[in-house]
Amino acid sequence: MTTTKFSVFTVLFLNLVFLVLSHSLHARTLTITIGEYPPYSGKSLAHQGLVPQILRKAFAKQNIQVKFVFMPWARSFKESEKINYDASAFWFCTDKRQQDYFCSTALYEETAVFFYNKNNPVPPWRSLPELDKYRIGATRGYSYTQEFWQLANTGFLDINVMTRDEQNLSMLLKGRIDLFPMGLLPATYLLEQNYPDKKHLLSYHTTPLMTGTLHLLFPKDKDGSIELLKTFNEGMQKIKASGEYQAILTQAQSTQAIHSP
């Protein structure tokens, strides 16, 4: 009789422990810094954009919830350096960043090209030094390439840095800059949203300024980051295997309204 009571008690106790642990896992919420880059990310977008949707799905597979804190890109990175947040999305995994962060598996691939105004066409280019006589827009907090910023810092290239992509597109349409590098999908989205009657004025060169993959960054100095990295990567594998990842990408695709010459 005593043994039976002990067994029942043990089973009840183990069930209670399981429920507590399960609740703890489900209740865990991560905070991730992120910037506005529609349609990939945006506070007012459905699901807050393509990237937050991917991140939520992947973490949900691992019983983890996510809260995104939107702020300007430069500030987003600086805040992540203070390790007040669990991770920062979404960045190129440069050698410099790998000194302080663990980089997740790739979220998606981005190709940035130079846009120009058809009323002020810029000839096709092969190397950045060829663009020394043009005014080039850039958005604060973006990586672009090491060569791009080196030429900008030395004054070889005339780079005008703004806070938002919309500002640079507006300046390009008004002829205040000659070139602006941006991804095709986000550029098309912003032009459709903000300048639908003027989008036909812009075109782009097919030569890419850069092509690379974007990642979720986990601070190396924050406890638990390596475990979160492994957890997230496992979640990404699951949504790719289930087809959910591709479904998100397919849904986000839009018809390219800007065509190269």
Image (cartoon, rainbow, N blue to C red):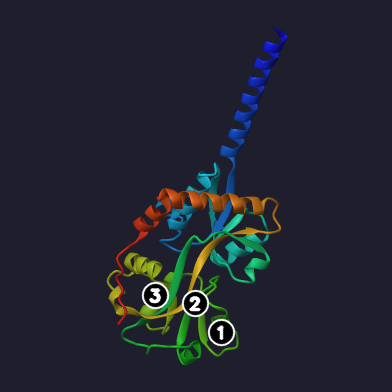
Calculate the distance from the C-alpha at mark 2 to the C-alpha at mark 1: 10 Å
The amino acid type, in three-letter code, at marker 3 is Ser
> Pointer 3: what residue?
170
N-term-proximal mark, 2 vs 3: 2
Q: Residue 29, relative to residue 131: is it above or below? A: above
Q: Which mark is residue 51?
A: none
Report the residue at 66% width, 59% height from top: 219
Q: Quadrant of the N terminus?
A: top right
x and y percentages locating residue 115 in the rendered image: 39, 79
Q: Residues within 10 Å of mark 3 (few under 14, many from 20)?
A: some
Q: Residues within 10 Å of mark 1 (few under 14, many from 20)?
A: some
x and y percentages locating residue 141 in the rendered image: 55, 70
Q: Residue 183, relative to residue 249: is it above or below? A: below
The amino acid type, in three-letter code, at marker 1 is Ala
> Pointer 1: what residue?
152
**Left/right of residue 125 with respect to residue 226 in the rendered view:** left
N-term-proximal mark, 2 vs 1: 2
- Is label 2 in a helix, a strand or a loop? strand
**Left/right of residue 162 with respect to residue 11 in the rendered view:** left
> Pointer 2: what residue?
138
